[in-house]
Amino acid sequence: MNAKRWLIIFSPLWIGLATMQAAEKSGVLRPWEKNGWYWSYRDKPVMLLGGSDDDNLFQWPEKKLIAQLDRLVAAGGNVIRNTMSDRNDKGFEVYPFKRLDNGKYDLNSWNKAYWTRFERMLHETARREIFVQIEIWDRFDYADLGGSNRWQVHPYNPANNVNYTYEKSGFAKRYSDHPGANKQPFFFTTPKQRNNRVVLRHQQRFVDRLLESTLQFDHVLYCMDNETSGEEEWGRFWAQFVRARAARQGHDVYVTEMWDDWNLRAERHKRTFDHPELYGFVDVSQNNHNKGQKHWDNFLHVRNYLASQPRPMNTTKTYGATGNKFGHSDQDGIERFWRHLLAGASSIRFHRPDSGLGLSDKAVACIKAARLLESIIPAWSLQPANELLVDRDPNEAYLAADNGRAYVVYFPAGGMVRLDTSKAKGLLAVRWINIDTGELGPHQGKTGSGKTALTPPDNKNWVAAVVSQ
């Protein structure tokens, strides 16, 4: 058979394969080529907004999970956080390992129920185009903090498995210190740390099994840890491990690390900021322990630091709920959501109760208001621009703008500022959005260029969308 004959037979096959590969490349959640601060999905920019009433929704009973996801979608939300946490805090959580008749676990055998739940969550979120930021390791799972017995009952504790002893693993019987002290040997197993092969092989096997499920999907992001204060080599090892495993299957994945330090100027954060070749996005959730102008300035410090090579900046934990242990209020949570939105965050999710608003009515209203704003002025067309606000007091108002064309001003509690619209040509339309209801408010009418006075309808949460006509 001649070459032309072979070409005729196999050309459709090669064209089909090329089409599939192109579709896979364009379909995956990835930084947007036109604006690297934001995500894109199927070649279109996408703003990730969400909230959920727990951090490990995959552990939830099916009906409860479905109801939560449907409520999120109805609000306009499209992102959840999913820690791989297995601590039995609510009575229905399960461990990933098989429990034997003698009551101990075999780390070489899986608990089918755990992975079935995980894959169900992946399927149900994919169906709804809800994106998932996974956190592989949660330091609170392996400590007996505050009198809890999480380490006492965990399968990785040598007393509870048939795979290794205290002596061979290097583990102790109890870890009562706060995980921030970083005394748990679980987080020192990698080759450039203590090279604990006895435990590491089981950790690798777990992450391999996780990726076996997630690499079937294109809506997943990976964070190595929950608010870690560990050594740099720990997170770096797992980031490289995840990316290498994905690459062997021809997948691009995006990974990050979440550092515990509330000060985003701290040197520790540069472990992620300075390595775009490894960490395709950054997570600055712990900034949400800060308030007011400091919260805004802290975020913008990172944005300026990354400006030469923009990457998405995610905040998967927006703290703030009245009565929580941190002393934050519901209003704090709402303000943090909106400051991050205008400052240029790519993903914003309300943290679970009682540390955050979760998917409460207030969170739902916020998400609806943000989507309403997006329909008028998409966030990826704007830049933070407080310098265009005149007569502004600290924390009185915040501005993002496409100067001369569109302006978005957030007021947390009333006030009055003047907006410098001198670059605008023609008239500007001002439309108010009520953040507390998620609905359109009054139409202020049209104004010309120059200094436009803006006063919200009352002293609650309002955002003004000012658009050139």
Image: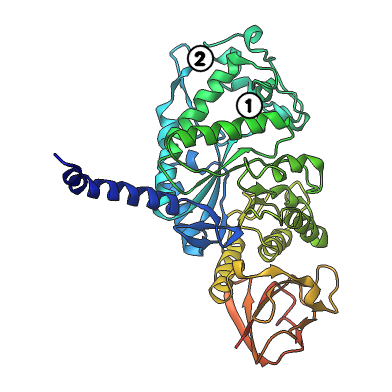
Q: Quadrant of residue 123?
A: top left
Looking at the image, which is closer to me, 236 or 370?
A: 236
| Residue 73 picture location, percent across and down | 47, 60
Vertical placement of residue 253 versus 469, above or below = above
**Does 205 sit left or right of 261 as displayed?**
left
What label sits on residue 150 in the rendered view? 1
Looking at the image, which is closer to me, 133 or 88?
A: 133
Vertical placement of residue 395 versus 169, above or below = below
- Amino acid identity at mark 2: Lys
| Residue 64 picture location, percent across and down | 45, 47
Q: How is the image coloured?
A: rainbow
Q: Circle 2 — which element?
A: loop
What label sits on residue 48 in the rendered view? none
Q: Quadrant of residue 420?
A: bottom right
- The residue depicted at 67 percent of the width and 53 percent of the height is 309
The extreme left residue here reads: 1
Q: Is residue 286 visible?
A: yes
| Residue 104 picture location, percent across and down | 51, 14
What residue is shown with label 2? 104
Q: How many marks?
A: 2
| Residue 412 picture location, percent across and down | 74, 70
- First-in-chain label (1 vs 2): 2
- The residue depicted at 63 percent of the width and 20 percent of the height is 152
The extreme front residue here reads: 2
Q: Quadrant of the N terminus?
A: top left
